[in-house]
Image (cartoon, rainbow, N blue to C red):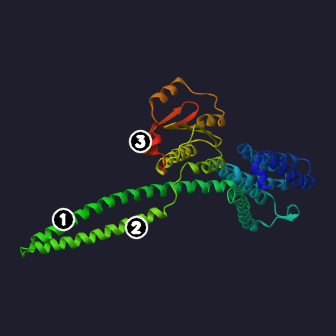
């Protein structure tokens, strides 16, 4: 049933509300009479709206809890619907809504409890249970407060637990999250792998330099042996030190070679489909189009393209609401290549907020003169420049954000053989 409530906003909560009101409200009607229908109906509506309209539900819970007291009735069994509403709110509402719902439920339930305990006289009965003497009321009030906290706390935690367990653990969303983490790890490993490659090149250069120095030192040693002096011993020591350094550097070069063989495969164009699936599971409408004949890029160039798409999607995930549409275009034109990543995050946010204001001429002017900046965008531009590319970051007023990267000489970076 919880999956049903998760996937639908109206029907499941309405079904739960009707079922609980018929059962609990039926008992109230039989025991206390028709006046109980007012509180029952209010709490039933609150429960029915708990998934779709959380704030309205919280307000109705508050009214429905107080109404029986105002009508001079005993606490109603249908007030347990407030606990069911709290469970659903805890699962699906925002953080602020969840906290407000929990606070309202605890405060009002405590107020009703204290009213029953301290306003009624000793010897009166509630559902056939006789109230204790005045001396025992304080102990009963403390026990009741603990019970209220326990019931509402369990409802709140159960809602969060069920939501986490059913919505995330082992689901497509959970797998999408793992795919994203794997993609980020692949990029980190790829960067480290490239650094190792640079270190290996530098080490090879040092090997040549040390080798040349060693030959020169050995020649000098033979030349000065005719003159028995301290210089010969110094030169011999230099030769020994250089030989040791040469051996260490050779060992380091071999180690880096092993590291290169063990490194993970660099993420590239073949991994984009899994990335798109992950972000669709997150709730973004990713559409991918490709025109022209794809070039078989070398690993470094493919990694740059993958990183552009990955960083763009990460930026959308951080700043755009769920439901944002993302269009990704790969345009291959003989030697050149262009990648476009466009989103409608601003348009989607306005739609969710029911904001019909649109955008002004000032927004257009700012979009023309203000260039988006940030460390992530700067790093992306630097990587693109390594492959003679140009990247632009464009904010489209009233619509969203566009990333455009062009590589006029991408054919130079095609895999050989």
First in sequence: mark 1 or mark 2? 1
**Residue annotated with mark 3:** 385
Q: Residue 292: x percent and y percent?
A: 58, 37
**Residue annotated with mark 1:** 216
> Would residue 328 be visible to someone looking at this image?
yes
> Would residue 72 be visible to someone looking at this image?
no
First in sequence: mark 2 or mark 3? 2
Q: Nearer the viewer, mark 1 or mark 3?
A: 1
Q: Say whether marks 2 and 3 touch (CB < 8 Å).
A: no
Q: Which mark is residue 255?
A: 2
C-alpha separation, residue under disc 1 versus residue under disc 3: 41 Å
Q: Residue 291: x percent and y percent?
A: 59, 37
Q: Nearer the viewer, mark 2 or mark 3?
A: 2
User: What residue is rendered at 19% in x and 70% in y?
Assistant: 238
Kindly state the secondary structure of the residue where label 3 is placed: helix
User: What residue is rendered at 50% in x and 49% in y?
Assistant: 303
Dividing the picture into quarters, in which one does residue 74 lie?
A: bottom right
C-alpha separation, residue under disc 1 versus residue under disc 2: 28 Å
Q: Specify whether 310 is left or right of 43.
A: left
Kindly state the secondary structure of the residue where label 2 is placed: helix
Dot 3, crowdedness within 10 Å: few (<14), some or many (≥20)? few
């Amino acid at each position: 049933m919880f999956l049903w409530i998760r996937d639908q906003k109206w029907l499941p909560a309405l079904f739960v509300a009707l079922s609980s009101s018929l059962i609990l409200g039926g008992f109230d009607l039989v025991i206390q009479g028709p006046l109980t229908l007012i509180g029952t109906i209010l709490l039933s509506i609150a429960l029915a709206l708990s998934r779709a309209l959380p704030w309205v539900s919280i307000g109705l819970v508050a009214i429905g809890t107080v109404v029986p007291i105002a009508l001079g009735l005993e606490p109603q069994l249908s007030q347990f619907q407030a606990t069911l509403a709290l469970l659903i709110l805890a699962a699906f509402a925002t953080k602020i809504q969840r906290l407000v719902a929990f606070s309202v439920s605890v405060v009002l339930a405590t107020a009703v409890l204290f009213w029953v305990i301290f306003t009624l006289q000793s010897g009166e009965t509630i559902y056939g249970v006789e109230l204790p003497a005045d001396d025992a009321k304080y102990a009963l009030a403390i026990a009741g407060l603990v019970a209220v906290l326990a019931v509402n706390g369990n409802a709140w935690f159960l809602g969060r637990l069920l939501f986490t367990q059913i919505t995330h653990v082992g689901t497509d969303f959970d797998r999408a999250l793992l795919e994203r983490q794997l993609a980020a790890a692949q990029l980190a490993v790829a960067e480290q792998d490239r650094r190792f490659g640079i270190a290996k090149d530098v080490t090879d250069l040092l090997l040549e330099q040390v080798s040349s120095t060693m030959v020169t030192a050995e020649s000098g040693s033979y030349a000065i042996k005719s003159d028995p002096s301290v210089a010969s011993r110094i030169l011999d020591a230099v030769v020994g030190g250089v030989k040791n350094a040469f051996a260490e550097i050779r060992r380091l070069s071999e180690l880096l070679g092993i590291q290169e063989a063990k490194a993970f495969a660099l993420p590239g164009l073949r991994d984009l489909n899994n990335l798109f699936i992950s972000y669709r599971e997150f709730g973004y409408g990713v559409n991918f189009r490709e025109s022209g004949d794809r070039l078989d890029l070398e690993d470094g160039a493919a990694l740059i393209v993958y990183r552009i798409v990955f960083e763009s999607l990460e930026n959308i995930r951080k700043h755009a609401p769920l439901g944002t549409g993302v269009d990704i275009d790969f345009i291959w034109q003989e030697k050149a290549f262009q990648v476009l990543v466009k989103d409608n995050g601003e348009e989607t946010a306005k739609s969710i907020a029911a904001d019909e204001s649109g955008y002004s001429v000032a927004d257009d002017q700012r979009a023309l003169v203000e260039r988006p900046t940030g460390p992530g965008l700067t790093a992306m531009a630097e990587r693109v420049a390594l492959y003679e590319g140009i990247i632009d970051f464009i904010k489209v007023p009233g619509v969203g954000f566009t990333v455009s990267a062009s590589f006029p000489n991408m054919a130079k970076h095609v895999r050989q053989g």
